[in-house]
Amino acid sequence: MILDVNGVTKVFSGRRKSRVVANDNLTFRIHEGEIYGLLGHNGAGKTTLVNQILGLSTPDSGKIMLMGESVLQSPARARSICSVQPQSQVPLGLLTPKQAVSLMGKMRAGENFDPKRVEELFDALDMTEWANTVGEKLSGGFRRLTSFCMAVIAPGNLVILDEPTNDVDPVRRRYLWQVIRNLTNDGTSVILVTHNVVEAEKAVDRVAILHKGKFLAQGTPSEVKSSVSNQMRIELSVAKESAEIEIPGWALSSYQNGSRILFSMDPANVPATIDWAKNQVDKGFVMDYSLSPTTIEDAYITLTSGKAVV
Ligand SMILES: Nc1ncnc2c1ncn2[C@@H]1O[C@H](COP(=O)(O)OP(=O)(O)OP(=O)(O)O)[C@@H](O)[C@H]1O
């Protein structure tokens, strides 16, 4: 096992003697070669948890063991076992991606650093063309990819990636997930910290949903989904954002975000749903629709809103 987090609680003091329970009795384990998704809204407690795994802050109670030893007893060891891509952009200044990634490789691997690995990584992410462009002239996406390469050039046993695909285009996102999967094939474990539930569903082996410091669900994406429902969902793009679509009788729950509307339904009602959706398109109320089993995004919304959404 790489990481064993047991009953970790961290409390901050807020304004006027208030207390913020940023992590509330969190327990989970990560095995070799596993990608573990940590999902949660802003302020859910993800960074607080990561900082404690890295030995940058101390739990008020509970234990964190990294590869069999307590982080508390040896925070420096924890930082050498973990490689991190922070959420904020790394200030590259006048360094090029090639210089920054090579520097990090030399710092982490010393004499074992192989410069060919930098070329392989840039090639895998289709960024060779930008390898020698100074940081301040790079787009946000290439800066993010450079920061990702710095985290994985000489990875520790546990790689922690905080929103690694922010600003990255869809094609390179796919390349990036492939690089991550290849890392895990060599036994490296990954914690993926993200708000992007849809993307995480495809990438992770197991997932935890963190909300207001507590885990609301943990397991494989299928386990988390089935803990909430085994329903179907229809997603609609309405023609006008202001359009108010009447909630159909078969809808078990509904959710609207701008021009996107989701309804959940019992699988037995799929034929009626398709007829209804075609009718909405014919009337010009709906631009298009898609029908699918409920996703982890639905489970996430249901769990974190406390409401029966799709
Ligand atoms: N040093 C601190 N002092 C007081 N409160 C803090 C401190 N650090 C975090 N908090 C509070 O703890 C809670 C969890 O914060 P945390 O940064 O861990 O959330 P997060 O899930 O990483 O959020 P985001 O996705 O926005 O980065 C928040 O309510 C935050 O205001």
Image (spheres, rainbow, N blue to C red):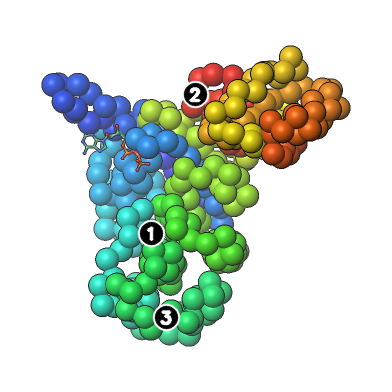
Residue 70 in view? no
Residue 238 screen position, x and y as percent = 64, 34
Report which quarter residue 262 is drawn in: top right
- At x 25%, y 72%, the residue is 93
Q: Earlier in the sequence, mark 3 or mark 2?
A: 3
Q: Distance between the residues labelled 3 and 1?
A: 19 Å
Circles 1, 2 touching at the beta carbon (< 8 Å) = no
Label 2: state its secondary structure. helix
- At x 48%, y 50%, the residue is 192
Depth-wise, is mark 3 or mark 1 nearer the camera?
A: 3
Who is closer to the viewer here, 23 or 260? 260
Residue 19 in view? yes
Residue 283 screen position, x and y as percent = 75, 29
Report which quarter residue 92 is drawn in: bottom left
- At x 19%, y 21%, the residue is 18
- At x 59%, y 52%, the residue is 203
The residue carrying pointer 2 sits among few (fewer than 14), some (14 to 19) or many (20 or more) residues within 10 Å by Cα, namely: few
Label 3: state its secondary structure. loop
Label 1: state its secondary structure. strand
The residue identified by callout 2 is 305
- Image-quarter location of ligand 1: top left
Circles 3, 1 touching at the beta carbon (< 8 Å) = no
Q: Which amino acid does label 2 sit on?
A: Ser
Residue 191 screen position, x and y as percent = 47, 51
Is 229 placed left or right of 191 in the picture? right
The residue identified by callout 1 is 85
Q: Earlier in the sequence, mark 3 or mark 1?
A: 1
The residue carrying pointer 1 sits among few (fewer than 14), some (14 to 19) or many (20 or more) residues within 10 Å by Cα, namely: many
What's the mark number on residue 131?
3
Q: Which amino acid does label 3 sit on?
A: Ala
